[in-house]
Image (cartoon, rainbow, N blue to C red):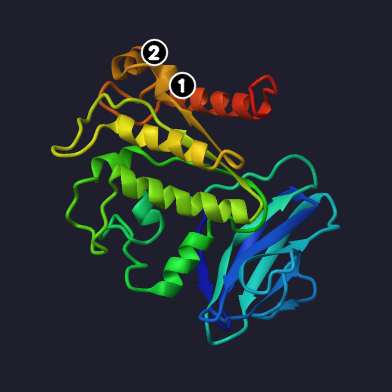
Amino acid sequence: MQLAWRIQTGNTITYNLPSCTAFEILCYNDANITGTFSYTVDGGGSTAITATQADSSGNTSGYKRFAVTGLSQATHTVVITGTAASNAIIMGVRYHSGAGVIVSRQGRGGYTTLDALGFGAAFPGNPNAVGNAAAQARMAAFYGAWGPALWILHFDYNDWQAQISASYSSGLKPTPTQYSANLQTMITNIAASGGCTLLLGGGNSPSATTPVGGEELTAYWNALKALTQANADTCAAMIQSEYWGSAADGVALGLNASSTSIHPSVRGYGSIGRGIYSALSDRTIPGI
């Protein structure tokens, strides 16, 4: 889970890293968020980071990453300290040893695509960007943050279930059309950063029906397919229902946590993981 911490003068965050030779401090600032911070490694000297300082990719505003390399192959302690009365936003520390692929994850159970962009309903949703242009821009810009990468986006079931909800203060509802528009915003921003998107659709639900007056779950999967066609150079989709079969098939195969749960079992998550790995590594798949 990707968390954000707001720190000011005297506030500290400590990260105890496992054995690694490098790490990156992930943070954010813009014209409205101007806090500064410093960091130390293993109790050594302090390094100051100013609000407008260019990060390791040359970015002077927005989502930033400050890379620290050349460490010994050992555990390390990183302490980040706020140095201004205004907020500094720290998104976390990402560690590695210069090999393999860095994997990060961000999300919250129950969110729709509207929630992810701050236009959702009240708790447990996320309406924080309604009427706040700066927050809207900040949340949308998260998709594509920290440079070129593959983003795997999994939204469908919650949008489908909330499509006729009247509780969205933004006046928007996660209909298939709005769902597609929200995902297009994310895809566009990811592509602008040099990245690509894999849209992940889920399985059929053994426990829920289409909301009265709404569209079937297949409409959301069709939207994913249409997005891949509209963004063919940077976007692909994988839909679990096309592998798992009907809701009854998924339950019979033990892919659901229970006979009444949309959530995958351990076997189900394993199936999803194997499918993604195969899609990313099998060069016999057209387009790879």
Position above or below: 45 against 255: below
Q: Position of residue 48 (x, y in %)?
A: 73, 79
| Residue 108 in view | no
Residue drawn at x 70%, y 72% is 39
The quadrant holding residue 213 is top left
Tag 2–tag 1 contact (CB < 8 Å): yes
Q: Residues within 10 Å of mark 1 (few under 14, many from 20)?
A: some
How many discs mark residues in the rendered view? 2
Residue drawn at x 44%, y 24% is 268
Read off the residue under disc 2: 253
Q: Position of residue 90 (x, y in %)?
A: 57, 67
Read off the residue under disc 1: 267
| Residue 208 in view | yes
Residue drawn at x 46%, y 21% is 267
Describe residue 255's horizontal placement relative to residue 170 as left or right.
right
Element under label 1? helix
The residue lying toward the viewer, choosing from 221 and 55, is: 221
Q: Position of residue 148 (x, y in %)?
A: 67, 51
The residue lying toward the viewer, choosing from 167 and 234, is: 234
Q: Position of residue 11 (x, y in %)?
A: 56, 77
Cα–Cα gap, marks 2 and 1:
9 Å
Element under label 2? loop
Tell me, for residue 183, which label it has, or none: none
Q: Looking at numbered disc 1 in the image, what kind of residue is underneath it?
A: Arg
The quadrant holding residue 126 is bottom left
The quadrant holding residue 253 is top left
Q: Looking at numbered disc 2 in the image, what kind of residue is underneath it?
A: Leu
Q: Residues within 10 Å of mark 2 (few under 14, many from 20)?
A: few
